[in-house]
């Protein structure tokens, strides 16, 4: 062993004497990295609770960077507790795994985010957890499907791709009434996928949900460069169940990714409003084009569930995400729809939304839905995510692509 005051270079580079002074008063949260956290002595180790946000045990359980992001997301969503996950889909899975057991049933809207259906129909079904899809435009259909085995109800507003805005208030109320009357009393968890509302268009906990899931991949990232999800709650006991599952599954997030979200959060409301304004303008313009048979944008009067959007979002400023779909003339061929998407120059073909680049994606409704979709007119479904480009350039792009598709008939 080397002398205590003369360590070998290899040792010195690890156990270095220099400590940077405190007091670097930047308002920016540093990227704290680390798996190991050093305990000052064994007593400190024994006293530390891995769940507590008043100290640190291991990088996976929390760092100053993750705690800071969690607190800001609680503020955004109006909740009290938060867990961070490596994707929005992992956040959906965390909720299911934490609250469901064999023999339970989960209810999902028929227009729920597609991969949530896949998780339910595969892993959850494999573990003896049953499910039913309910009509997203009919609160009575949801309540009629509740049973003593129902443990979890997913809500999503608006629905993925088809954008119908559900009667959230009626659905929450119906579920609460059922849960209060069932014997033996058993908790019914109401979980909202709040990615579209993003904490800006409405306040999920004011509606009475238990859990708000947010794909931070979308607006909180804003750059199309990070995948992350969050699960926010107000109920402490429910949070500890989520957090325990989160720990046992090893669902940590990378510090650099947290930094990116922390950097993007301050501009999120401005981006959301700008993308909303452009999307609304383009949706209205597309609604006037002869090839478009229906525009699916909850803030537009003819869109399914517009009244429900008004009830929930107008008290908070009447906002909507920069996302909408259209149904193109059913007499168009598949080739024309493809030609339209291919002809777009500014709108790129790709999944996701909320980033700076506008995106387009054609969808086939057949296979996506289990129940009748009476609110939708027949036609070819195409979804747009509006980015931060100038709306005049986007409108010109749509106009030229429609012309190309007409010629492809
Ligand atoms: C994108 C999305 C998710 C999943 O987020 P990922 O980070 O891509 O896994 C979940 N729900 C909704 C509504 C989404 O749009």
Image (cartoon, helix red, strand yellow):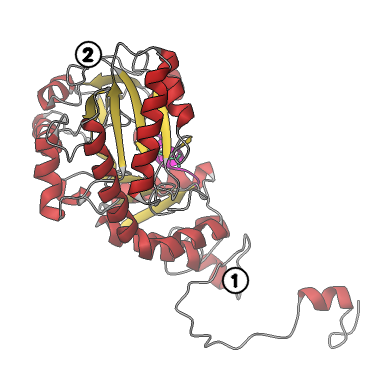
* On-image quarter of the C terminus: top left
* On-image quarter of the N terminus: bottom right
Residue 157 shows in the view: no
At x 31% / y 60%, what residue is drawn? Answer: 270
- Which secondary structure type mostly characterizes the magenta part of the structure? helix
Along the line of sight, the residue nearer the viewer: 207 or 114: 114
At x 51% / y 63%, what residue is drawn? Answer: 259
Which picture quadrant has residue 220?
A: bottom left
Ligand 1's image quarter is top left
334 left or right of 163 in image? right
Residue 75 % position (x, y)? 29, 62
Along the line of sight, the residue nearer the viewer: 359 or 160: 359
Residue 321 shows in the view: yes
- Rounded to the nearest whole Å, what is the CA distance between mark 1 and mark 2? 59 Å
Which picture quadrant has residue 12?
A: bottom right
**Residue topped by disc 2:** 372
**Residue topped by disc 1:** 39
**Mark 1 in CB contact with mark 2 (< 8 angstroms):** no
Q: Earlier in the sequence, mark 1 or mark 2?
A: 1
Residue 234 % position (x, y)? 25, 53
Along the line of sight, the residue nearer the viewer: 307 or 43: 307
Q: Is 254 part of what is drawn in magenta?
A: no
Residue 142 % position (x, y)? 16, 24
At x 27% / y 19%, what residue is drawn? Answer: 132
CA neighbours of label 2 inside 10 A, class few (<14), some (14 to 19), many (20+): few
Residue 384 % position (x, y)? 36, 36
Residues drawn in magenta:
86-98
């Amino acid at each position: 062993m080397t002398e205590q005051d003369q360590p070998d270079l290899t040792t010195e580079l690890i156990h270095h004497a220099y400590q940077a002074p405190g007091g670097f008063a930047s308002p920016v949260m540093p990227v704290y990295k680390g798996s190991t956290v050093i305990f000052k002595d064994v007593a400190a180790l024994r006293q530390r609770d891995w769940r507590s946000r008043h100290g640190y045990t291991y990088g996976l359980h929390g760092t100053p960077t993750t705690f800071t992001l969690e607190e800001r997301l609680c503020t955004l969503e109006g909740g009290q507790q938060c867990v961070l996950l490596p994707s929005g889909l992992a956040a959906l899975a965390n909720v299911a795994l934490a609250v469901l057991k064999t023999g339970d049933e989960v209810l999902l809207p028929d227009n729920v985010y597609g991969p949530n259906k896949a998780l339910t129909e595969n892993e959850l079904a494999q573990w003896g957890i049953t499910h039913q899809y309910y009509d997203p435009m009919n609160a009575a259909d949801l309540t009629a499907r509740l049973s003593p085995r129902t443990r979890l109800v997913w809500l999503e507003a608006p629905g993925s791709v088809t954008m119908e805005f559900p009667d959230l208030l009626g659905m929450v109320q119906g579920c609460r009434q059922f849960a209060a009357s069932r014997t033996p009393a058993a908790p019914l968890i109401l979980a909202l996928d709040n990615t579209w509302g993003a904490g800006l268009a409405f306040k999920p906990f004011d509606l009475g949900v238990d859990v708000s899931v947010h794909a931070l991949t979308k607006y909180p990232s804003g750059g199309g460069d990070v995948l992350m999800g969050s699960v926010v709650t107000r109920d402490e006991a429910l949070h500890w169940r989520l957090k325990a599952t989160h720990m046992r599954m090893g669902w940590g997030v990378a510090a650099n990714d947290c930094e990116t979200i922390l950097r993007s959060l301050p501009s999120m409301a401005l981006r959301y409003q700008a993308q909303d304004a452009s999307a609304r303008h383009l949706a209205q313009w597309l609604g006037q084009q002869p090839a478009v048979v229906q525009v699916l944008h909850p803030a537009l009067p003819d869109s399914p569930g517009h009244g429900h959007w008004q009830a929930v979002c107008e008290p908070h400023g009447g906002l909507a995400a920069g996302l909408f779909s259209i149904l193109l003339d059913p007499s168009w061929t598949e080739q024309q729809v493809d030609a339209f998407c291919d002809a777009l120059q500014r709108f790129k073909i790709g999944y996701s939304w909320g980033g700076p680049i506008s995106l387009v994606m054609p969808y086939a409704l057949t296979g996506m839905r289990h129940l009748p979709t009476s609110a939708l007119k027949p036609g070819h479904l195409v979804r747009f995510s509006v980015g931060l480009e100038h709306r005049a350039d986007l409108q010109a792009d749509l106009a030229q692509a429609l012309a190309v598709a007409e010629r492809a008939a």
